Amino acid sequence: MNNKLIQPKSPWLHIASVSISDLTNYLWSLQRDNTNTVIRLIRSQNMCCDRDMFNEVSAAYQFPYYFGCNWNAFNECITDLVWLPADSYITAIADYDYLINKWPDGAKYLIDSLLYAAEEWSKPINQGEKWDRPAKSFHIILHSSSDIISSFLQKHGIETTDLAIVTT
């Protein structure tokens, strides 16, 4: 199993160039082997504007009722997740190339926000308070069947690795 996804170490962003079925099977096996990991699959085809993206991600991560449906509230919730405790978090975005084609600005904002969350989660909190926690892993998997993701991320200077998913 790919343990780099449950370690709080960069790079945080990974590209999976496999079928959606293979990605789903991989995520299920990863969940079985790492029971204290929260894995969420976000569907790009349900997102073409801020509102749709906030609805899709907030439903997947079960954001609280007071989530404000704006980017600041999104960043606050995705770096909190106190209602969804885990040692590691993995966000897989299915058909990311669809999002790039349909809503390129949103595709960039979403990745920027998730990378910000990954950086925040990788830092331990040691303030002598009840919310103290060790560093935690937060990784992002971008699923695609095309090369458009690599060129999009390169254009924006975003570092990634290819995720080797063994299919049967």
Image: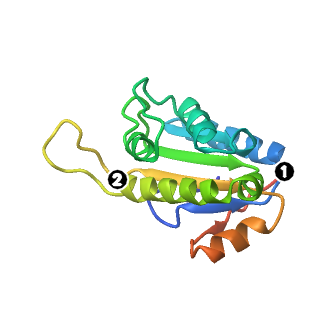
Mark number displayed over residue 117:
none
Image x and y of residue 63, in percent? 47, 30
Residue at image x 15%, y 48%? 127
Q: Which of marks 2 and 1 is nearer the N terminus?
A: 1
Q: Is residue 8 above or below residue 87?
A: below
Name the front one of labels 2 and 1: 1
Count of marks overlaid on the render: 2
Residue at image x 38%, y 52%?
Answer: 121
Q: Can residue 45 be seen in this view?
A: yes
Mark 1 neighbour class, 10 Å CA radius: few under 14, some 14 to 19, many 20 or more: some
Q: What residue type is labelled 2?
A: Ala
Q: Label 1 is placed on what type of residue? A: Ser
Residue that label 1 marks: 19
Q: In the displayed structure, would residue 13 be above or below residue 159?
A: above
Residue 5 in sight in this render: no
Residue 130 placement: quadrant: top left
Which one is nearer the viewer's eye here, 106 or 89? 106
Q: Nearer the viewer, residue 49 or 141?
A: 49
User: What secondary structure is found at the residue carrying circle 1?
Assistant: loop
Marks 2 and 1, how far apart at CA: 32 Å
Find disc 2 in the rendering and name its residue. Answer: 135
